[in-house]
Image: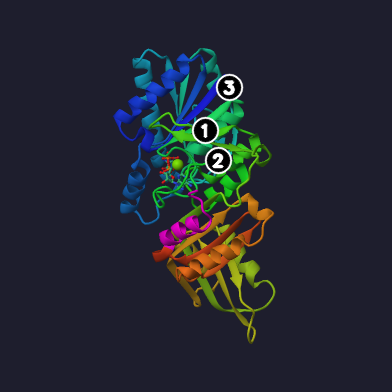
Amino acid sequence: MLIVQKYGGTSVGTLERIKEVAKRVARTKEEGKDVVVVVSAMSGETNKLTQMAHSLSKNPKRREMDLLLSSGERVTSALLAILLTEMGHETIAMSGRQAGIITDSVHTKARIDHIDKSYIENELKKGLIVVVAGFQGITEIGEVSTLGRGGSDLSAVAIAGALNANVCEIYTDVDGVYTTDPRIEPKAKKLDKISYDEMLELASLGAKVLQTRSVELAKKLNVNLVTRSSFNDNEGTYILNEEDIMEKPLVSGIAIDKNQARITLRGVSDKPGIAAEIFRKLADEGVNVDMIIQNVGVDGATNLGFTIPENELDITKKAMEEINASQSLEYDKNVVKVSVVGVGMKSHSGVACTAFDTLADENINIEMISTSEIKVSMIINEKYGELAVRALHDAYKLDK
Ligand code: ADP
Ligand code: ASP
Ligand code: MG
């Protein structure tokens, strides 16, 4: 039986915490299981390194950022391996490169192309515990790459998939996936199970308990995924296929994404090819455009609104300058996206209306709306973000 365990930043945030993690890993090994551990950097480390780089340069090269940021995970992997060995468990630590994790060459948000699993497997065969530094790999030409924020989740899922592990356990600082961020709504309830699709929506809409791409990959490779706390032994949340969940709640959770900015381009000429030009340019720059609204044109001109991640605002402004669309650009950083997610929406009407009613009752203005089969998202002023989350949580009775 093979188990992949991933420990996030707070779980390995201090040497004391690393000792607790080592005990859990040792326990698993002593139960006779093969263990691959994937670790994050100690909490705050990735931010600290990022800030250091940005204090020296406004626009550090992404290649160097990868070299810099990947060091955080390597520190933790080495420390944990040193400790496990000291405890009498033969252990080997590996960087992404040493673990055979091959990515594309998009520095700072690389995608895993494949894993040469022989490196990890050879060590497991010898009976060793393998500790892999998360969040990183190497490109075909041997450059260090990183997988985007929260990417250690992806490392763990990819390794579990490649090695056909029995389960991939994501250890974090909460007991599992809740109906909403328990730091915002203390009445949030832990879910015993959630479908891949709902988890995917929640993650991509701001619930950072699991990184979006890790959920996507878990679904694709059919990895048995569970999130649980490294601070206790409580049962976690299982992420499963929708068919395997008997009782489907109408709404499973509420997510909030604070990393949002709204752009408005005024007086854009209303003719074929304009939207294509604007969004092609943004795509080329790697900007993640989300909601798009185009008004009905008047006198050959129209207004185009869309949302982007707030930290991509500078690239967006520059891109619009380059295609001469910046004279009419307005932006608002003080917005958040609040979303209601649930597979039950497929078969029930009225879910969206309840959301709009709820925000109206709180006197919160909705600036933009988008919906899919299983979610309703609303852009609102950030002042009311957390209030909206709590009001929606109440409205759908998620604390019951
Ligand atoms: P790690 O460092 O272990 O990867 P993260 O900080 O990335 O942990 O993710 C865990 C955090 O996600 C929790 O502390 C919690 O505040 C936040 N979170 C947001 N939405 C949810 C949710 N629906 N359920 C559980 N946690 C959530
Ligand atoms: N250390 C990286 C981050 O903070 C990756 C991770 O923790 O998953 O984003
Ligand atoms: Mg995380």
Residue holding disc 2: 214
* Colour scheme employed for the rendering of this structure: rainbow
Residue holding disc 1: 156
> First in sequence: mark 2 or mark 1?
1
The amino acid marked with disc number 3 is Ser
Q: How far apart are marks 1 and 3 (CA)?
A: 16 Å
The amino acid marked with disc number 1 is Ala
- In the image shown, does 200 or 181 lie closer to the viewer? 181
Query: Is 17 placed left or right of 294 in the picture?
Result: left
Q: Is mark 2 on a helix, strand or loop?
A: helix
Q: Position of residue 128 (x, y in %)?
A: 47, 16
In the image, is residue 42 above or below residue 123? below
Q: Is residue 393 magenta?
A: yes
> First in sequence: mark 3 or mark 2?
3
From this viewpoint, which residue is outermost toward the front?
A: 400
The amino acid marked with disc number 2 is Ser
Tell me if residue 141 can be seen. Answer: no
Q: Position of residue 211 (x, y in %)?
A: 51, 44
Residue holding disc 3: 118
Q: Is mark 3 on a helix, strand or loop?
A: helix
- In the image shown, does 274 or 63 lie closer to the viewer? 274
Q: In which quarter of the image is the N terminus?
A: top right
Counting other residues with Cα less than 10 Å from the Cα at mark 1, is it few (<14), some (14-19), or many (20 or more)?
many
- Name the image quarter holding residue 105: top right
What is the span of residues highlighted in magenta in the rendered image?
385-400
From this viewpoint, which residue is outermost toward the bottom?
A: 299
Counting other residues with Cα less than 10 Å from the Cα at mark 3, is it few (<14), some (14-19), or many (20 or more)?
few
Q: Which residue is drawn at 40% across and 38% down?
A: 173
